[in-house]
Image: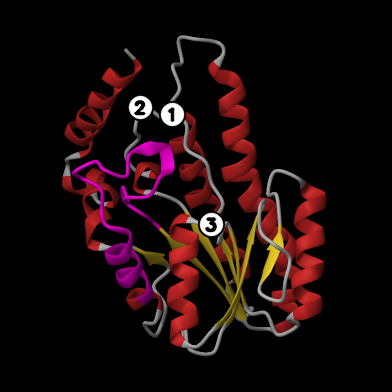
Amino acid sequence: MDITTRTVFIAGGTSGLGLALAERLRAAGSTVVVGGRSAEPGPLSVRIDVTDPASILAARDEVLAAHPDLDTVVTMSGIMVAEDLRDPAHLASAEDTVTTNLLGTIRLATAFTPHLLARGAGAIVTVSSGVAFVPLPLTPTYGATKAGVHSYSESLREQLRGTGVEVVEIVPPHVATTLMGLQDAPTAMPVDAFTDEVVGLLAQEPTPPEILVDHVQFLRRAVVEGTYDDQLATNAQMLSMLR
């Protein structure tokens, strides 16, 4: 996709990976509107809470009123919480995670799809995770929602095929953001390196259906390469944090 001329809305674009992507796309020449719960309303930012259907629709209307040429929507909002499945108290966190990560993605994509279809061109960019393909047992509901985002993205792409609206799935590895406070982990990919690689892949023609940086390939290909069980066992070592 031509990232120099897009008009983009990034829900979850006020911090972390969403903000880093917004800055790269703006630097490339695109107009980027960011959304978040604490965003200060303005020409390039809107308040949005993806757990609230009314907030999503209000943000959509605000964005489209200011930017009727909007052609790209990025569903970046997400939360990641450690859960002890032996403790029934985890259910509240699980429900919040499903509402934010999975329902938020579905609701946001659904809200903007009619506009993009009417244009006959555009892109919906979802964000899953490497743990959609090999779970991180420390964050079971997070992994389940990201697997759901992957599956939903695949189906949405097929249903929109031939309409001019493409569906692109970004698949981050462990990136050094403040998500779950693991930004200093030695295995984390630096935010700048991740974002640079993502933007390079997005700029390809045709745009790959999955944006897979090198650092996430071992998770995406674990089943094919026969490393799934070993990688799952490695991921499970983080369960020691619960104890």
Q: Secondary structure at mark 1?
A: helix
Q: Position of residue 131 (x, y in %)?
A: 36, 42
Start-end of magenta stretch: 171-199
Tell me if residue 14 comes above or below residue 148 in the rendering: below
Residue 137: give its label.
Answer: 2
Q: Secondary structure at mark 2?
A: loop
Residue 103: give its label.
Answer: none
180 in the magenta segment: yes
User: In the rendered image, is residue 149 in sight?
Assistant: yes
Residue with the most extreme front position: 40
Query: Mark 2 packing: few (<14 Cα in 10 Å), some, or many (20+)?
Result: many
Of the 4 image quadrants, the one containing the C terminus is top left
Looking at the picture, tell me which residue is in the foreground, 214 or 179.
179
Which badge, 2 or 3, is on the more N-terminal residue? 3
Q: Secondary structure at mark 3?
A: loop
Pointers 2 and 1 in contact (CB under 8 A)? yes
Q: Nearer the viewer, mark 3 or mark 1?
A: 3
Q: Which residue has dot 1 on it?
A: 140
Tell me if residue 1 comes above or below residue 133 in the rendering: below
Q: Which residue has dot 3 on it?
A: 76
Tell me if residue 239 comes above or below residue 148 in the rendering: above
Q: Position of residue 61 (x, y in %)?
A: 81, 68
| Three-letter residue code for mark 3 | Met
Which badge, 3 or 1, is on the more N-terminal residue? 3
Alpha carbon distance from label 2 to label 3 = 22 Å
| Three-letter residue code for mark 2 | Pro
242 in the magenta segment: no
| Three-letter residue code for mark 1 | Pro
- Which residue does the image show at 39% across and 85% down from the upper left? 205
Q: Nearer the viewer, mark 2 or mark 3?
A: 3
Residue 220 relative to residue 178: left or right: left
Alpha carbon distance from label 2 to label 1 = 5 Å
